[in-house]
Image (cartoon, helix red, strand yellow):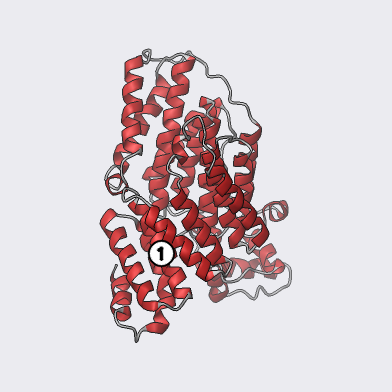
């Protein structure tokens, strides 16, 4: 698995092939040009790159000069997103869909670690999606006409690949990528009518979304973002507003996961403007509640939790969109419990998480592994160390069995909370196992 998200400053250094010492030298040069001392050393740069400290205004001005970044970018983007190496999403529209699909396939094969899209970039893309009407496809592309039976077969195979149980999906990532490549080639090279084109773009959106989640679970956030951008472009070309909202929700989930709760809230606001199905609205509201809880906004969190519960209880006449069809009372209970845990209501959180765990079907083991870490957190806050250890070990066993790196990462994040309890039976062995994993 790649390293977790790198800081933009580290990425910008990499673009110039600069070490931390090289950057110190460049900052000193910039400072001397103004008759100043930079005050920067490798320790300071390391703190900036590990998100432990933010450089002051004078230091940021020197960094901008070293990287030839105009001052207007500092005002427009804010630290650290004005640094070189930002990845800007393409505007929505049929003219950019194939480009986005090609970029996504290259990203899926690229092992680089990269920052996700900047908050400003994502905000612009989401706003475009919320306001745009999908463009009509042109029906004249070079190549052979796409046969209707072929499209049915592609759709059926795609459905099977994207709905496999969690434990089987760990072995199908390459199949999903290959299927997406086939669909992309047809979109680019074949001749088809408008209806067939919409079906192909809808299928590309579904496959790119699933492939993005494979990368997200592996900690490859840049690749996940590129695949989800392609999914959003394809959903837009297909006129599938529901799926587009789902992709924005995935971006929002990623943002909250990476500690950018405010970005998540903004994304979900745009997504909510484009969905009407109650199950979809419930999921989006629940994810926004998680972001509000991360920011400590109790009233907004409780309002969204209440609305999410109300929406999930609505009996809809149409089935839920595929991207949220799995949403259930189990998800509502566990994520509501996680919200309460973030807000300090530990006992209530513990009860809700336990309730949701009991409702979760076995087919969703990756979700179970993540929920187990939430449950472990609630036990740790209650200082029930033996139970926390039992639940965390179960999560690690499950994550190892099904090949779920994201679950392993969550377990690792619990390790510091266990360290003060080395005297408890099993804790030293568990910590040693984590070091070896």
The N terminus sits in image quarter: bottom left
Residue tagged by mark 1? Answer: 373
Q: How many marks?
A: 1
Can you give x and y, in whole percent of width and height, for residue 329 in the image? 46, 49
Can residue 13 be seen here?
Answer: no
Whole-percent x, y for residue 111 in the image: 38, 51
192 to 415, vertically: above or below: above
Where residue 180 sits, quadrant-wise, is top left
Q: Which residue appears farthest toward the bottom when viewing the image?
A: 423
Which one is in front, 331 or 202? 331
Q: Is residue 264 left or right of residue 211?
A: right
Residue drawn 57% across the image and 43% down it: 311
Secondary structure under tag 1 reads helix
Closer to the camera in the image, 284 or 203? 284
Crowding around mark 1 (Cα neighbors within 10 Å: few <14, some 14 to 19, many 20+) is many
For this view, does 290 lie left or right of residue 146? right
Residue at (31% x, 44% y) in the render: 165
Asked if 294 appears above or below 240 in the picture, the reply is below
Screen quadrant of the C terminus: bottom left
* Residue 98: % across, % down: 47, 29
Residue 359 showing in the rendered view? yes
Residue 430, given in percent of the width and then of the height, sits at 30, 75
Quarter of the view holding residue 169: top left
Determine the residue positioned at 42% across, 65% down: 375
- Is residue 61 placed above or below 71 in the rendered structure? below
């Amino acid at each position: 698995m790649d390293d977790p998200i790198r800081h933009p400053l580290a990425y910008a250094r990499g673009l110039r092939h600069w070490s931390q010492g090289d950057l110190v030298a460049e900052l000193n040069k910039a400072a001397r040009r103004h008759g100043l001392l930079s005050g920067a050393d490798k320790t300071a740069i390391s703190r900036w790159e590990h998100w432990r400290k933010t450089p002051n205004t004078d230091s940021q001005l020197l960094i901008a000069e070293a990287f030839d970044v105009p001052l207007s970018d500092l005002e427009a983007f804010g630290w650290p997103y004005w640094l070189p190496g930002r990845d800007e999403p393409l505007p929505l529209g049929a003219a950019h869909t194939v480009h986005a699909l090609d970029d996504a396939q290259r990203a899926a094969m690229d092992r680089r670690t990269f920052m996700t899209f900047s908050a400003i970039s994502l905000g612009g893309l989401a706003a475009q999606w919320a306001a745009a009407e999908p463009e009509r496809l042109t029906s004249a592309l070079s190549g052979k006409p796409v046969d209707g039976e072929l499209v049915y077969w592609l759709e059926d195979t795609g459905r099977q690949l994207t709905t496999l149980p969690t434990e089987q999906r760990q072995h199908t990532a390459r199949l999903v990528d290959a299927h997406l490549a086939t669909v992309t080639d047809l979109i680019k090279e074949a001749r088809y009518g408008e209806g067939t084109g919409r079906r192909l773009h809808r299928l590309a959106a579904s496959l790119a979304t699933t492939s993005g989640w494979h990368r997200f679970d592996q900690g490859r956030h840049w690749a996940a973002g590129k695949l989800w951008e392609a999914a959003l472009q394809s959903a837009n070309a297909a006129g599938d507003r529901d799926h587009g909202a789902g992709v924005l929700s995935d971006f929002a989930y990623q943002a909250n996961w990476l500690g950018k709760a405010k970005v998540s809230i903004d994304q979900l606001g745009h997504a909510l403007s484009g969905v009407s199905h109650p199950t979809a609205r419930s999921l989006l509201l629940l994810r926004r509640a998680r972001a509000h809880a991360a920011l400590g906004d109790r009233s907004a969190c409780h309002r969204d939790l209440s609305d999410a519960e109300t929406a999930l209880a609505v009996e809809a006449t149409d089935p839920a969109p595929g991207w949220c069809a799995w949403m259930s009372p189990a998800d509502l209970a566990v994520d509501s419990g996680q919200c309460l845990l973030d807000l300090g209501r530990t006992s209530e959180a513990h009860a809700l998480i336990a309730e949701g765990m009991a409702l979760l079907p076995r087919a969703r083991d990756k979700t179970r592994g993540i929920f187990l870490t939430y449950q472990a957190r609630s036990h740790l806050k209650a200082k029930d160390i033996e139970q926390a250890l039992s639940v965390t070990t179960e999560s690690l066993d499950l994550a190892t069995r099904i090949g779920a790196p994201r679950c392993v990462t969550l377990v690792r994040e619990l390790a510091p909370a266990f360290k003060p309890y080395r005297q408890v039976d099993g804790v030293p062995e568990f910590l040693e196992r984590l070091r070896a994993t």
